Amino acid sequence: MKVLLCTRDKTLCLNGVHRVEEPPEDLEGYVILLDVDTVGLSPLADLRENNVLVAITANSIPGYVMKLISLGFYDVLRKPVREDKWKELYAKLEEEFRHRERVIPFRPEDTYLHGELCEELCSIAGSTEGVMGSVLRILGKAASVDVPVLITGESGTGKESFARALWKLSSRWRGPFVAVNCAAIPHELFEAELFGYEKGAFTGATSSKRGLMEEAEKGILFLDEVGELPLSLQSKLLRVLQDRKIRRLGSNREIPVNFRLVCATNRDLKDMVKQGLFREDLYYRISVIHIHIPPLRERRSEIPMLLNYILSKVCKELGKRIEGYTEDFLRTVLEHPWPGNVRELENAIRKAVTVCYGSILTSKHLDLPSVESPSHNILTIVEEEVRRRIRAGERNIYNRLMEMMARVMAKTAYEELRSQVKAAEVLGITRTTLRKLIS
């Protein structure tokens, strides 16, 4: 590790460090201790590209220290520099340079796709091979025909990004992309938001308003979390898909509409149909083409390419320069289960880049939560499902949930053992009961 002290203050002296009054030109691979009080910040632009900069200052104002860090300094030492502080910094820098010897270089130009459409695809698919290859092929076919599409997948897998990619690939790319989060709209406002209303249709309707279905004319209407649509509105949506006409609230006039419907959900709509929570006829109407996005844990081979794309995107947004990451950093990323999928990965990378004061990402920059045990995850899911059903005003929740869990256990045991006799035995139920549950 080559260290250079740049100062005009002769009272500043650090053992074992070469001191100069002016930084020489063409420095590369140095740790430069810059006395910003005497030398100033003018050399900063020329030095920070290929060196590690440490500021030395008598200014103790927190805001000034943060400003120096934001300008690209690795750390800030306060005058007078005590020996223990220098040793502490030296140990940190030694570790930093040790990591650099095993660094995996990162270059933004290496991200394999460019352009607006490709940004949508890169954000969810690390590769056009393997698991996502077949999914992308379905996307290509879906873009060529003007029929409703249902996109399913866990939270954070990138369902909206996939819908936007579908829009940009389709013949409707000149029209608008209108996204609606069905879980965020109160049930009593759903109809007014989707269909629009006339002046005086209800208290507070002081003027007419176009609904989101009209706003999506000649484009895409994206209904995210479509499983949250109340049953009363499901029948009206079905009629719109059949007749291609709507009526605003407070009006008898029919308005023709022309949009392509794309829906997304992280719920099992088939199971909701069995429970009477989702209309079967609407399910088949919205899922003419079904695209399922696998969770990130099932496509780990794509993580390195996703990582590079996200790094390129985040560095551009934050105006930071990252040269690469250590093997330990990559290993940690690959081994984490990512229950929040691509969204969680992007948030983790964004945080790592933010807290990294150098140009090399290490595992210490990753602040990943510990993964809960499977049993705790199951209990959490059940708790959230009970709360959701209570808020939705459902009744007979216990029996419905118990039946749903019984079906899941029966189906899983049978698929694992491929024998009704063995599956019934391990579950402690009769074959007759098992057959009813898996039918």
Image: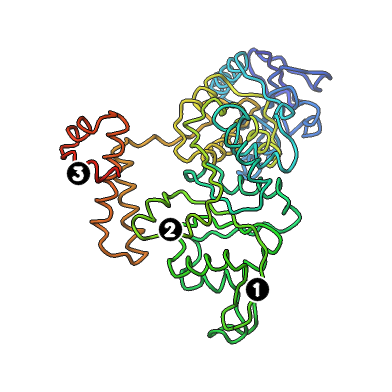
| Residue drawn 82% across the image and 18% down it | 26
Q: Nearer the viewer, mark 3 or mark 1?
A: 3
Q: Height in image: 257 above or below 347?
A: below
In-image side of 156 versus 321 (left or right) = left
The residue drawn where x is 68% and y is 40% is 119
Q: Classify 10 Å Cα crowding around label 3: few (below 14), some (14-19), many (20 and above).
A: few
Mark pair 3, 1: CA separation = 52 Å
Q: Of the residues under marks 1 and 2, which one precedes in the sequence?
A: 1
Q: Position of residue 374 (x, y in %)?
A: 32, 36
Judged from the image, the secondary structure of the residue bearing numbered disc 2 is helix
Please give the residue where the numbered disc 3 appears in the rendered image.
Answer: 433
Q: Position of residue 251 (x, y in %)?
A: 60, 83
Q: Position of residue 394 (x, y in %)?
A: 32, 64
Q: Nearer the viewer, residue 140 or 242?
A: 242
Mark number, residue 210: 1
Amino acid type, mark 1 = Arg
- Of residues 369 and 109, which is closer to you in this image? 109
Q: Mark 1 Cα within 10 Å, few/some/many (few <14, many 20+)?
A: some
Give the mark, 3 or 1, whose residue is nearer the N terminus: 1
Residue at mark 1 to residue at mark 2: CA–CA distance: 29 Å
Does 118 sit left or right of 212 as displayed?
A: right
Name the residue nearer the viewer: 163 or 335: 163
Q: Is residue 360 left or right of residue 265?
A: right
Check the image and report above or below for 399 versus 197.
Answer: above
Q: At label 3, which amino acid type do we have?
A: Thr
Which residue is pictured at 73% across the width and 23% down the height? 10
Residue 352's quadrant in the figure?
top right
The circle on residue 280 is 2
**Where the N terminus falls, by quadrant?**
top right
